[in-house]
Amino acid sequence: MGLFEKLNVWSIFGKMTNSPLGTRFQSAFRKLVEKGMKPLAAGACEEPPAITPLRKPLAEARVSLITTTGVHLKDQEPFDTAAALGDSSYRAVPSDADMASLYISHTHYPLERAQKDINVILPMERLRELAEEGVIGSVGEYHYCFGFDLHVKELVDPSAGTAHELARALKEDRVDVVLLTPG
Amino acid sequence: MCNRAVSLIARVVESYGISTVSLSLNRELSEKIGAPRTLYLRYPYGAPLGEPGNVNQQRAILKDMFAALETIEEPGTIIDLPYRWRRDTFAPVSF
């Protein structure tokens, strides 16, 4: 909610819809967004996060990446960049994918640098090199990529949340360490 | 916003017994949500690992991330990395 206030979204929106019908639409839309944002406010966590110490040498650890920068394979379905609250789905990108087969669907950060070198948002090639050098044990089978997303419940809900789904997939792949990068 | 999702996902993944390290480009959001281990960079959005093609820079930041697995013991810790956007030169990084 803070962000919406900061960006003065409602006043801009109000000017755009300055008519009786527009005002009604605005009020209905605002209610809808605030309803959607409610779980987001709840996302501010009072409890400290869990912590899992790495119990093996890094040289034996299996490492995967998670990013919220909208990376996917060109032949995977793009993220929904038109939805106001974003897209809570994720794409599993094979860690041995050709860099030229990747695409970025995201509209909330400047893409130029990542389009020149995806490693600045998803350091896939660097991770492969570190595995070859023996610095890390191995790279997980997949890296997991999200797009722009404000749906907290869809992400963290214990029974259906996508974050839980991919945490289980990472466990199955025996991944020990996950590095996360924002956009 | 994506910094918020990163912290939330990191919390979930860590709770499954997987060690996570998150990069952050927005300290305020990272403080609010609290990922298990966070490294904050004063870098622009869209470039958490630095400049395109700068392999040494990317490796330096990855090295910092792996080091955080050992150095951070208190959950929710945020380390401010000392790098300044476009003002540092990075030597080849060995691990």
Image (cartoon, grey):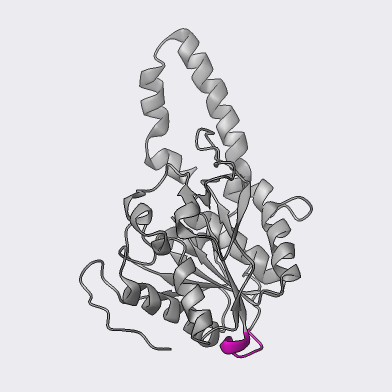
Q: Is residue B1 visible?
A: no
Between residues A14 and A173, which one lies in front from this camera angle?
A173
Where A87 falls versus A114 (above or below)?
above
* Residue drawn at x 51%, y 74% as measured from the top left: A128
Q: Is residue A123 left or right of residue A164?
A: left
Q: Is residue A183 left or right of residue B15?
A: left
On the image, the x and y values in percent for residue A84 come to: 52, 34
Q: Residue furthest top?
A: A20
Q: Residue furthest left?
A: B87
On the image, the x and y values in percent for residue B6 come to: 54, 59
Q: Is residue A55 magenta?
A: yes
Where A183 falls versus A10 (above or below)?
below
Q: Quadrant of residue B73?
A: bottom right
Q: Which residues are magenta?
A: A54-60
Q: Quadrant of residue A83?
A: top right
Between residues A75 and A70, which one lies in front from this camera angle?
A75
Q: Is residue B62 magenta?
A: no
Where A157 falls versus B77 (above or below)?
above
* Residue drawn at x 70%, y 64% as measured from the top left: A167
Between residues B57 and B69, which one lies in front from this camera angle?
B57
On the image, the x and y values in percent for residue A36 come to: 61, 37
On the image, the x and y values in percent for residue A144 come to: 59, 59
Q: Residue furthest right?
A: A159
* Residue drawn at x 49%, y 21% as measured from the top left: A26
Between residues A63 and A7, which one lies in front from this camera angle?
A63
* Residue drawn at x 60%, y 79% as measured from the top left: A138
Q: Is residue B48 left or right of residue A181?
A: left
Where A121 falls versus A3 (above or below)?
below
Total residue callouts: 0
The quarter in which the C terminus of chain B is drawn is: bottom left
Q: Is residue A35 visible?
A: yes
